Amino acid sequence: MAFRRPSCRSSFRCLGAIAAAAALSACVSSPGPQVAGSGRCHDAALGWAVGQPGDEATLKRLSRESGAGLVNPIGPATVVKHDARDDRLRVYLDADNRITAARCE
């Protein structure tokens, strides 16, 4: 019986599984963002954001003012599902990273 080395492909597959498991355990053990209030999204007063840059400071302000538990930036080529969530704010961005809309969806 001859010893046979595993192929590189199967070795890389094992390493990928180990890395994925380590990344998953890091995600599961880390706490999510802290949301004040119920986490329900309200977009009535977010019209000021249209035309603003889609930078971190603006997205944080939108998150705070909307009360949303999840802020989802959407780029011009991003495909989205048309599912509805009470806690999600979608921020639509154009090719120049300017906000075109901010809606609870």
Image (cartoon, grey):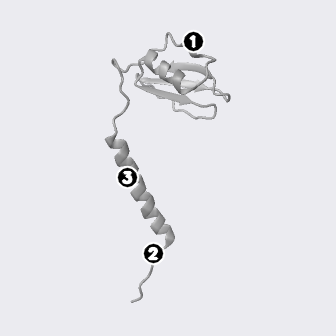
Which amino acid type corresponds to the residue marked 2 in the rendered image? Pro
Q: Residue furthest left?
A: 29
Picture layout, residue 74 above or below residue 30: above
Can residue 105 be seen?
A: no
Q: Are marks 3 and 2 in contact (CB under 8 Å)?
A: no
- Residue 74's disc number: none
Q: Position of residue 70 (x, y in %)?
A: 43, 27
Measured Cα–Cα span from mark 2 to mark 1: 59 Å
Q: Position of residue 17 (x, y in %)?
A: 41, 58
The residue at the point 35 percent across, 26 percent down is 34
Residue where numbered disc 3 is placed: 22
Measured Cα–Cα span from mark 3 to mark 2: 23 Å
Judged from the image, the secondary structure of the residue bearing numbered disc 2 is loop
- Residue 48's disc number: 1
Question: Along the polypeptide, which appears first: circle 2 or circle 1?
Answer: 2
- Mark 2, Cα crowd under 10 Å, few <14 / some 14-19 / many 20+, is few
Judged from the image, the secondary structure of the residue bearing numbered disc 3 is helix
Measured Cα–Cα span from mark 3 to mark 1: 41 Å
Q: Residue furthest bottom?
A: 1
Which mark is nearer the camera, 3 or 2? 3
- Mark 1, Cα crowd under 10 Å, few <14 / some 14-19 / many 20+, is few
Q: Tell me the quadrant of the picture where the N terminus can be found.
A: bottom left
Residue where numbered disc 2 is placed: 6
Q: Residue furthest right?
A: 96
Picture layout, residue 8 above or below residue 77: below
Q: Position of residue 43 (x, y in %)?
A: 48, 14
Can residue 5 be seen?
A: yes
Which amino acid type corresponds to the residue marked 3 in the rendered image? Ala
The residue at the point 48 percent across, 23 percent down is 60
Q: Are marks 2 and 1 in contact (CB under 8 Å)?
A: no
Q: Where is residue 78 in the image (x, y as percent from the top left)?
A: 59, 34
